[in-house]
Image (cartoon, rainbow, N blue to C red):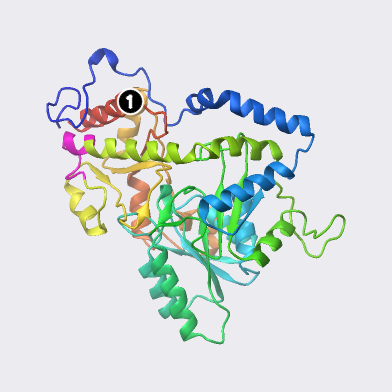
């Protein structure tokens, strides 16, 4: 492999041996905090002075700002991204006895929220290029296997890139035309990793009936604790979610249904409002870092090309190289919650990077259909081959807005040395 430190054809700058970083974290929230510390402390003080700690004006203001960002008509703040998924599913009409089609390759909450709503998850394999849920398989299963009482499709915008929402819209329309007497299928977005992402110019959060966002501290837009939000264009759904997050109570001490305590803390809303003003710039920095990674991987010979927009077939053609990049859809505005590669000898590579104090993570080491808790579904190894192979190959590399180019260079140089 070519050296990134000494190559004359590297796309930018030189990294001298004395400037090699002592460590490169996967994520460094301290750097972000250092840049906004005064704003954050002022926002927290504002909440403390108000003595309104749950819901209230800060949450209401954040809801308006998130609705504007996403292009949705309404946003409903809640306690976590997991809570947001449950609210989104229930508001979209998912009930006990229903089933919901979703990806086999995501964080556990994507599926556990379905179960909490009383429904059965129907796992679907993923696209080999993007690793987002494969719309073609969803459509084929709806036509041939006909899962019982399908009430919703829950695509996950994995790693910050939207799933192909045009295809899902078409699937839902075709199903409605063929089953005119049945209730329609709702599209519920799991946008936990995709704040600020777009598909064909439309924002994540405004692409389905409802959408769930997470503000877990590692997310692109992150709280200082747990928090989430749900978006929708439907006023009835928005009102229903406001009621559900507050013990099913339309007014104090009166309860028309069983909800939950899923309210957002005002301090989290205030912190998020500070960060929201920076999210566009932070996401742009992530895109620039991803482009630098792409260029350096190509220059090193670790990948067969540096194309950031690829099809699944082009991805498979990279199989002779030790590192493969995930596909980027031309319709997608990616926000790179994670920069993920597919690596040969992934676990050995990760150990090598750790010895150099370079952070990495595996998102996700075991597909959902193989999780022990879902054994009752009767699925087994081999049922979702693309997701299962991805689980053996994916590796997330350091990615956050304040990441330095020298750090990215050292990460790629280290990977090149491992495979040399």
Image coordinates of residue 79 in percent, x first then y, are: 66, 46
- Above or below 250: residue 302: above
Residue at 25%, 40% (x, y): give it: 294
Residue 68, compared with residue 138, is above or below; it is above
Q: Quadrant of the C terminus?
A: top left
Q: Is residue 118 visible?
A: no
Q: Residue at x 62, y 40 (%)?
A: 226
Tell me the residue at 38%/21% (across/down): 23
23 with respect to 234 (left or right): left
Position of 319 compared to 72: left or right?
A: left
Circle 1 packing at 10 Å, graded few (<14), some (14-19), many (20+), is: many
Tell which residue pokes out farthest to the left in this image. Answer: 8
Helix, strand or loop under label 1 = helix
Which residue is painted at 29% across and 52% down in the image? 327
Q: Quadrant of residue 365?
A: top left
Residue lying farthest top? Answer: 18
Name the spot of residue 383 as percent of width and height, x first. Answer: 39, 63
Closer to the camera, 396 or 64? 64
Residue 412, by quadrant, is top left
Q: Is residue 304 magenta?
A: yes
Residue 156 at what x, y percent from top left?
Answer: 46, 56
- In the image, the segment drawn in magenta is 296-306
Q: Residue furthest right?
A: 253
Q: Please tell me whether residue 287 belongs to the stretch shown in magenta.
A: no
- In this rendered view, identify the residue nearer to me: 63 or 190: 63
Q: Where does the image place residue 247, in percent across and percent down from the top left?
A: 77, 55
**Which of the 4 quarters of the picture holds residue 336?**
top left
Q: Which residue is mark 1?
A: 407
Q: Quadrant of the N terminus?
A: top left
């Amino acid at each position: 492999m070519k050296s990134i430190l000494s190559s004359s054809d590297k796309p930018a700058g030189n990294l001298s041996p004395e400037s090699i970083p002592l460590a490169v974290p996967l994520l460094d929230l301290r750097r972000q905090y250092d840049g906004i510390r005064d704003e954050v402390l002022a926002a927290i003080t504002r909440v403390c002075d108000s003595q309104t700690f749950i819901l209230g004006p800060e949450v209401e203001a954040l809801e308006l700002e998130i609705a504007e960002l996403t292009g949705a008509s309404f946003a409903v703040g809640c306690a976590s991204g997991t809570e947001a998924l449950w609210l989104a599913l229930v508001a979209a009409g998912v009930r006990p006895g229903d089933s919901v089609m979703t990806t086999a390759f995501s964080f556990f909450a994507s599926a556990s929220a379905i179960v909490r709503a009383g429904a059965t998850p129907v796992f679907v394999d993923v696209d080999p290029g993007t690793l987002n849920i494969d719309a073609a398989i969803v459509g084929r299963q709806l036509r041939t296997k006909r899962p019982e009482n399908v009430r919703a499709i829950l695509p996950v915008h994995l790693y910050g890139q939207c799933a192909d929402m045009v295809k899902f819209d078409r699937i839902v329309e075709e199903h409605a035309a063929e089953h005119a007497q049945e209730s329609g299928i709702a599209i519920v977005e799991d946008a936990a990793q995709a704040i600020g992402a777009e598909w064909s110019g439309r924002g994540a959060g405004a692409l389905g009936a409802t959408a769930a966002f997470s503000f877990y501290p590692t997310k692109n837009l992150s709280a200082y604790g747990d928090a989430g939000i749900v978006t929708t264009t439907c006023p009835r759904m928005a009102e229903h979610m406001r009621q559900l997050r507050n013990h099913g109570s339309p007014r104090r001490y009166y309860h028309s249904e069983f909800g939950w305590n899923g309210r957002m803390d005002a301090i989290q809303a205030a912190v998020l409002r500070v960060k929201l003003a920076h999210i566009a710039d932070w996401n742009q920095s992530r895109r620039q870092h991803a482009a630098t990674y792409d260029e350096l991987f190509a220059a090193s010979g670790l990948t067969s090309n540096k194309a950031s927009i690829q099809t699944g077939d082009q991805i498979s053609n990279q199989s002779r190289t030790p590192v493969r990049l995930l596909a980027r859809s031309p319709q997608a505005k990616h926000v790179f919650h994670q920069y993920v590669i597919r690596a040969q000898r992934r676990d050995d590579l990760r150990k090598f990077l750790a010895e150099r104090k370079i952070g990495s993570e595996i998102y996700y080491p075991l597909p959902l259909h193989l999780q022990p808790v879902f054994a009752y579904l009767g699925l087994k190894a081999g049922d979702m081959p693309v997701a299962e192979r991805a689980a053996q190959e994916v590796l997330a590399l350091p990615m956050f807005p304040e990441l330095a180019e020298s750090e990215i260079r050292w990460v790629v140089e280290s990977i090149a040395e491992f495979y040399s």
